[in-house]
Amino acid sequence: LSPGILPNMYNPPPGLCWDQLCADPPVVDGDSPERNVDSIVTSFLQAATNQAQQYRTNHIIMTMGSDFHYENAHLWFKNLDKLIAHVNARQANGSRVHALYSTPSCYLRELHRANLTWPLKTDDFFPYSDGPHQFWTGFFSSRPAFKGYERLSSGFLQICSQLEALAGPSVRDGPYGPGDSSVLREAVAVAQHHDAVSGTERQHVANDYARQLARGWDSCQVLVANALSVLGGTKDPLVFCNALNISVCPLSETTTNFTVILYNPLAWGVAWPVRLPVSGSSYAVTDPQGQTVIPVSGVTRRLRGGAGGAPGELLFQAWAPPLGFSTFGVQQLSPGDSWDPPKRPPGDTVLQIQNEHLRVLFDPVTGHLREIQNLGKGFSLPVFQSFYWYNASTGDGLSPQASGAYIFRPNASTPVPVAKHVSTRLLKNALVQELHQNFSAWCSQVVRLRPGQPYLELEWTVGPIPVWDGLGKEIISRFETPLRTAGRFYTDSNGRQVLERRRDYRPTWNLSQSEPVAGNYYPVNTRIFIKDQKVQLTVLTDRSQGGSSILDGSLELMVHRRLLNDDNRGVGEPLNEPGEDGQGLAVRGRHLVLLDTVAAAADGHRPLAQEMATAPAVVLAPGPGPHLRQLSPSALKFSGLRRALPPNLHLLTVEPRGARTLLLRLEHFFERGESQNGSRPVTVDLTTLFSAFTITSVREMALGGDIPLQSVSRLLWTTATGTRAFGGPEGVPGGSQQPLTRPPISLPGTPKPPPVPELDPRRVRLEPMEIRTFLASVQYRGPEA
């Protein structure tokens, strides 16, 4: 089903729609003047005959339903029951059509029983289009704030599930009240709907998705607080600051003495910059790496409105152990002083920022990024970066198609620069170097380097996009380099495998390009990069965005859209988000830029992308905060692991599944051949990995965690490339292929499960890109035992 298309997409044949939303007449099979069953059956048989001519077996599938259908399922099934009965009755008169209720799995098995040779598809289907000027590439970027919220929520759900697993079931009803991870889990699941995170819903529906996520955060924050109480041995109140991206946190703004708890959900230690709004100008932090206070930017002050008033931000470099947390005490040393506008450091004649890894140069006349130098490897690359906007089409002589929530269609291939000259402000101290760029009243960016950071951080703020001129606008951040890329660029597929993209090209058919921009846009979940034979420029995203390389040596990401026309794909309203004040939506996000050799690039972007997807969480407590009972008060840290995982492994899931049972997933997140060290197989000992509990038994499961791996039955297919490919009714395409030594024998019925090697939990081996799933029985230490 997935690599094909049905005659009516996913709708029923014409005249056979019997939902309450449909206008087709019902099946009337009694003796009455309205009797129409004979003509309906004839119409169905003709549709089946026409469809069968395009398919290779004598089994075809008809989808009986559509969007929003089955609110009144009785209407559908009453008519389908009649249709099936009367269609099959025609067999007595020689008809060869047999109709039955079925499922995709049953259909797949019948195709397998036909014992045919099938083509093997290795590319994907992007970008979609349903006409020469109708590319469905707008939804890659629609509703960027919700896309960012969904990504943050997914990361916080991991933290919530991990702490529930590490601290034990008592955290569901602890000192801070009842906590429940399922509320956020269900909200995040609903947000995966193809009209949710895609941004193709109406505004009031998007508001409701966000409301459900917020409810989930509330419930999970109680659970996280309970878990930190159990693990830290405290009942002090804990505070979550949900608006730190606009520098709002009432506790840090009004308290002179507080504690910061940094929880790290990754399976390796993480250094993380903590940035909190404060009223004082000098603080002491129980952290040997130092601290400083910097002014809150004017852009941030505008965004937060009346929500906060702190003049400065306390910045310090924190560290947290694998699957654990560290605590840091903060004490104000002096009362708040007046804040002077920052000035360029004395002696700085060149507009640049630098640390031990990178030197970043800016054009002194225009203020734009000009060059990035990799100091460790001794090479540089001219890189120009700026913001542009495509003028959204409202239809033209070629097509009435307008840009909308689904469709991206600019009215010209050349975007308009937001600004040719950028006002800049330089800030440098021991912990950070920043260049603040102001492109316009609605578009700004902070280019940031910290000590030890082998990448450049670009924090962009865009919106409200002005539409007073009647023009819808689609905003991009574009990077231009002299790299000779020959029309090739690379994007990730669902945050994992990377696919090569070629401009104006499709691997499996000859493309006649009719939309040179929209027809070359692809979804970017976590990364996009360009490269030549030696150098690679990679940009990581903090949310799903559309991206492309429209010009050789360039790459671009769409960060925001504001449109004034509907695209007639079912939303029924323009993508014109009002924002909190009704004047339009402002969005803030981050891009991380890495410049490295091609050979070493994956070693940088693979773990860094994982840090962006599951970032550490900051929790505050007034006063000195919790002291851990497991460790001395001076250590003030906890780790749920006895040791960090190897650098190419990710602990994808640690989640309760019943009484003293946990679901565990390990992921090898490197691809084969992309890294000399990272792409090697790796073996871990599950039995001694965790410190919070002891694993008493382990059973390996299928990826979904619902059935044992040894029970999985996958069908064996003969492909046109001379291989035997595995796939099955689970819908998980098999990644393994075997050379054909003899034609495969296809037997009817369910195939026997392939033999699964006996699991040794002390030696769990993972190949590149492999995910292994386990159900573990555990014995907790301490009160949960």
Image (cartoon, rainbow, N blue to C red):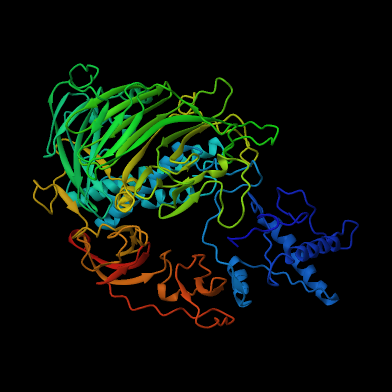
Res 280 quadrant in image: top left
Residue drawn at x 13%, y 39% is 289
User: Residue 405 vs residue 782: left or right?
Assistant: right
User: Residue 344 vs residue 26: left or right?
Assistant: left
Q: How many marks?
A: 0
Look at the picture and state if 13 lies above or below 512. below
In the image, 553 versus 36, the foreground residue is: 553
In the image, 566 versus 765, the foreground residue is: 765
Res 308 quadrant in image: top left
Across and down, in percent, residue 60 comes to 69, 67
Residue drawn at x 66%, y 32% is 395
Res 673 quadrant in image: bottom left
Residue drawn at x 19%, y 41% is 318
Q: Quadrant where the N terminus lies?
A: bottom right
Residue drawn at x 64%, y 68% is 102
Across and down, in percent, residue 515 comes to 60, 40
Look at the picture and state if 739 lies above or below 284. below
Q: Quadrant where the C terminus lies?
A: bottom left
Residue 248 visible, this angle: no
Residue 401 visible, this angle: yes
In the image, 615 versus 74, the foreground residue is: 615
Across and down, in percent, residue 651 comes to 30, 58
Please identify the residue farthest to the right as the structure is shown.
Answer: 33
User: Residue 590 vs residue 274: left or right?
Assistant: right
Across and down, in percent, residue 25 comes to 80, 53
Look at the picture and state if 376 lies above or below 748. above
